[in-house]
Image (tube, helix red, strand yellow):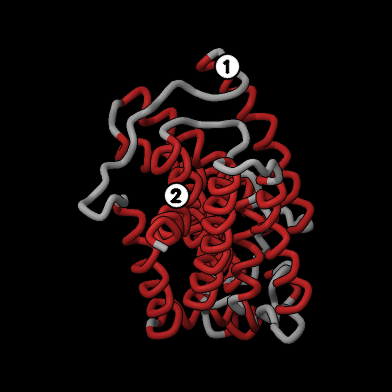
Amino acid sequence: MIGMLHGILEFAPVLVLAALGGVLSEKAGVVNIGLEGMMRFGAFAAAVGAFFTGSPWAGLACGALAGAASAAIHALFCLRLRADQVVTGIALNLVALGLVTFLLESIFGSSGVSPPVPTLPRGASGHTILAVAAFAVPLLLHLALSRTPWGLRVRAVGEHPNAAAALGVRVLALRAGCVLGSGALAGLGGAALSIGILGQFDTRIPAGQGFMALAAMVFGRWTPLGAAGAAFFFAAADALQRQLSFSLRASDLRIEGVFLALPYALTLLVLAFGSKRVRAPAADGVPYDPEGR
């Protein structure tokens, strides 16, 4: 049980931060399928920043900035050019897959992993500050969305953008800000993998964690606390499969590879049976045309 709890607190920040990024973007009406790519950019930039500066904190900032920069491209195509938001997100994931591999070879001369990089310091509990953020950020975002004028505007542009615009809300600017914030959170989630857990960048990062974060967002009904709870649930499944794999490696059985699919299979089951009665924001994925009001 102690090993399970440690594993949950170790990997939960990755999913929680990315899932909150999805909530922030889609609450404002912009579908963000590109969380996986934003996490990949964030993980790589964090490793590069920590390697060349010698500071994991600088790497963490680089990860957030890289996630926001990739989100800016998503915002440009979705909001200004009114491209299909799902297609744009998928394209961003594919670009991240190829571009980051190219940059890894160009900077470090490796197509697999980067050299070891400084990692975030760990407290007395054995966890980084990101474990605290996994509890604090969902609560702060919940309060911001539900109790502040800014949160009211975000929810308004995600449900009824034309009505919000009639009251003077700058719909496109607010949506763009939320998409950038979404990318920054996803970038931090990626950084939690490279400089928070592994101590290097691996080309397999984030290994589907972005899609699991999307599932957590849907399962959590597009709410910060619900998405965070679902992310902890998926993190528990990931910790369980690691414990089972470790136990089986010590035995004569050689089926530990089967358990690698456990978190992903659980994600599919949740989406298949747990998302039938949930409703996304009414204007989620609907392009806003200021001249069409």
Q: List the residue tagged with mark 2.
A: 188
Q: Is residue 76 visible?
A: no
Task: Tell me which amino acid carries mark 2.
Answer: Leu
Q: Residue at x 76, y 78 (%)?
A: 273
For this view, does 72 lie left or right of residue 87? left
- Mark 1 to mark 2: distance in Å? 24 Å
Circle 2 SS class: helix
For this rendering, which residue is in front, 34 or 199?
199
Q: Does 250 appear above or below 166?
A: above
Circle 1 SS class: loop
Q: List the residue tagged with mark 1.
A: 110
The outermost residue toward the front is 252
For this view, does 31 lie left or right of residue 239? right
Q: Does 62 appear above or below 26?
A: above
The outermost residue toward the top is 109
Task: Tell me which amino acid carries mark 1.
Answer: Ser
Q: Residue at x 45, y 43 (%)?
A: 191
